Amino acid sequence: MSESIFQHLVNSIDKDYQNTYAYVGKNLNFIRQLTQKIAAHIGCNVEKDIYLIDEKGSELPPFSFIEDAILIDNECFFSFKLVISVKSQGFNINNSGRSFYEKALVPPSGIILHFSIKQEDDIFIVKAPSIKKEETVSESFKINSDDSSWTELLESVGQVLIHFSKKDLKYRISQLSEESSEQTKPFGFSATPETKVISEPPAPLDNNDV
């Protein structure tokens, strides 16, 4: 007996479900792999020093339920914010006063890197922060099954982190002077749309997203 139109529709939708789940799963697994690769390249602990954040600022370890940290853009890229936490001993606000903190003059406690990834056939396209002429921009990299295809991307991420490690107190003071005539957020300072530097709040405050 031939398949009815309705059964054909059911089977087609079921297959579509499976293909969609598989596609999403591959992209999420790649994000976890990317996080592992970055952690290994820069020498941080993948379980403690690196994590994703969702729109509410909640920390999501790379091997947890990271789906809520993902935003899909109009080109179907999986976009997310990856935090490199560098809290060290933490900055004691009692040694400076709250105003010094609110003016974003304290050392950063972490750097937010913005990534977008998308599977196309047998490769993944990764949009990641990169340094060009001392400015942070978004650059595309293609990753395939060859381990060597990761090299350029990982080196670029490393250069971005080194670049922002040079933005010390003198830099933060200069930024404050330049922005003195502009309305700014309560804490934190802008890096670029792709990369941000965050500071640990002395009390529960809204997470900065500048």
Image: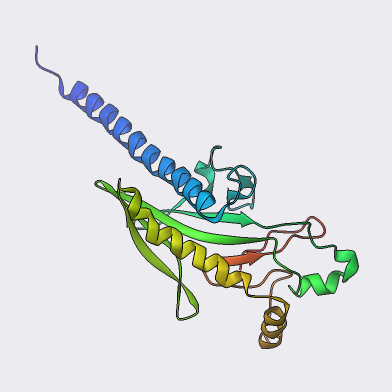
* Quadrant that contains the C terminus: bottom right
Is residue 82 placed above or below 129 in the rendered structure? Answer: above
**Relative to residue 74, is residue 168 drawn left or right?**
right
Q: Farthest residue toward the left?
A: 1
Number of numbered discs visible in the structure rendering: 0
Does any portion of residue 99 appear in the rendered image? yes
Is residue 102 placed above or below 81 in the rendered structure? Answer: below
Q: Farthest residue toward the right?
A: 94
* Quadrant that contains the N terminus: top left
Please name the residue shown 25% across and 25% down the image: 10
Is residue 46 placed above or below 188 in the rendered structure? Answer: above
Measuring from the top left, give residue 108's x and y in whole percent: 70, 65
**Relative to residue 93, is residue 130 drawn left or right?**
left
**Relative to residue 210, is residue 20 drawn left or right?**
left
Measuring from the top left, give residue 38's x and y in whole percent: 50, 52
Please name the residue shown 53% across and 44% down the image: 68
Colouring scheme, one of rainbow, by chain, secondary structure, one colour: rainbow
Instruction: Please state which of residues 118 and 16 is positioned toward the viewer in this rendering.
Output: 118
Is residue 110 placed above or below 165 in the rendered structure? Answer: above
Please name the residue shown 66% across and 72% down the image: 189
**Relative to residue 104, is residue 121 drawn left or right?**
left
Q: Farthest residue toward the top?
A: 1
Please name the residue shown 74% across and 70% down the image: 186
Does any portion of residue 76 appear in the rendered image? no
The quarter of the picture where residue 9 lies is: top left
Instruction: Please state which of residues 2 and 44 is positioned toward the viewer in this rendering.
Output: 44
Measuring from the top left, give residue 92's x and y in whole percent: 85, 62
